[in-house]
Amino acid sequence: MKDAKGVAGKGIEVVASAAQPVCGSAVWCATMQMCWDNMLATLCEGRPLVPLGGANELAQALNAGALEKGLLTGGYYAYSGERTMRARGEIEAAVRRITGEGSELLDRIDWSEPSPGMISLLFYSLLFRKFSFLVPFGVCEDEPWGDEGDEDDDDVCATYFEAYDPDRRLDQKMRKQVHPLYYVDERHHAVSLQTKEGDEVVLVRSPSGATFAEMWDNAVDLARRADRAKMRPLNDDDTFRCPNLSFAVSKEFLELEGIEFLDATERECKISQALQTVRLRLDNAGGEARSEAAIAVSVGAAMPDFSRMRHFDYDGRFVLFLLDGKVRGHACPYLALLVDDVRLFQ
C-alpha cells in the first residue's frame, strides 16, 4: 500500500508537452515548451523541427504544442543565446531577482567550451508564480483518499483544505472563493478557486482525455454546456475540499538528446541536453509554482557573408536625440547631444 505521506515527487512522471499521453500521476509545466518554441524561432524560423534520424514522438508532440501568445503577463524569464559562463551569470542573476533563490538547474548544464567549428547555444526558461486565497480555507487532517471500491487507495489518508470553519464565522467567505464550473455528479465536476493575485486554480474531478491538452479542452467544453441551475454558488448544503500538495521533481529528457536537425540556413544542429525541474505547493492559504527548463544545442558554425554585413558603429562624430516615445503625432526631442570629441564624455 502506498503511503500518502511518502517521498514527495517520487513516482510523478514529468511530461515535456501537454500533447503527450499521461497515465497515473504526472505533471506538465510550460517551461520546456517555452524553450522548444524559442529554439524553433531562433533556428528554424518558427517551423517545426524535423529530426534527420527519422520521426521522434516527443519532438512531434513539442512541435504540436506551441504556446499561445500572452500565456503569462509576468513571473517568467527566458534566455536564448550562446551557452557561455557570462550567460550563466546573467541567468543566475535573473533567477535570484525573480525567486529570491538560486537556480536548481544550472549546475546540471554542460558549460564546457564547444568543439572546434561549433557554436554552443542555450534556450532556458523560468516560471515562478505565487498566489494566495482571499480567505484561508479550513484544514482537516487524516481524511480518506480515493473512490470506494478502489483497492489501491484502501486505507490511504491525506490532509485537505476545505470550505468549513468550525466557528462558522468564515464559512460564507470561504465558499465565495469557490466557483463551480460544472457538476454532473459527485465524481464528475469542476471548480475554479479565486486568488488575490488574479490567478485561477481550476480543479477537475475525473478528467476525460489522454493528454493534459485534451483534459483541459474537455473540461472547458463541459463548463460551456453546463446546466446553469447547477452552477449556483456554494451554500450550507455543499462541500468543498482539496488535498494539500507539495512536491519537487526533475527530469532529463533522454529521448530528445542526440536529435540532429538542420536550421533555416542548412547548418547542422544537435540537441545535447534537455532538462526540466518542477516544484509545486498548494495548501489552505495559497500556493507557489516554480519550474526551470533548458535545451542545449550545438550548431555548426558558418563563415559570415561579409558582403551583406552592415556596420552600425558610432565610432565617429554623431548626434544623439532623446524623445518621449509616448507622445502621439509629431514628437520632438527633449535632449540632443553632439559627440565630436569622445574624450570629453569619458
Image (cartoon, helix red, strand yellow):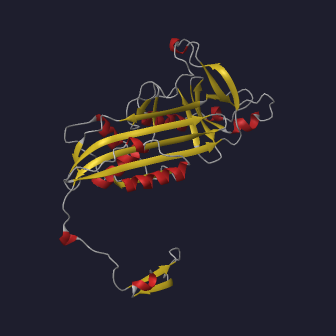
Q: Is residue 186 left or right of residue 83?
A: right
Q: Is residue 110 left or right of residue 172?
A: left
Task: Please indicate, yes or no, whether residue 74 appears anywhere in the rendered image.
Answer: no
Question: How many marks overall?
Answer: 0
In front of the other: 318 or 182 = 318
Residue at screen point 65% across, 20% down: 142
Residue at screen point 34% across, 47% down: 111
The image quadrant where one finds the C terminus is: bottom left
In front of the other: 11 or 205 = 11
Residue at screen point 22% across, 46% down: 261
Residue 247 vertical placement versus 84 (above, below)? above
Residue 131 vertical placement versus 255 (above, below)? below
Percent x, y for residue 151?
A: 52, 11
Q: Is residue 53 left or right of residue 92?
A: left
Task: Please indicate, yes or no, whether residue 309 appears anywhere in the rendered image.
Answer: yes
Q: Is residue 165 left or right of residue 122?
A: right
Percent x, y for residue 236?
A: 75, 29
Percent x, y for residue 320?
A: 43, 82
In front of the other: 281 or 191 = 281
Percent x, y for residue 23?
A: 42, 25
In front of the other: 195 or 316 = 316
**Among the 4 quarters of the image, the one containing residue 146:** top right
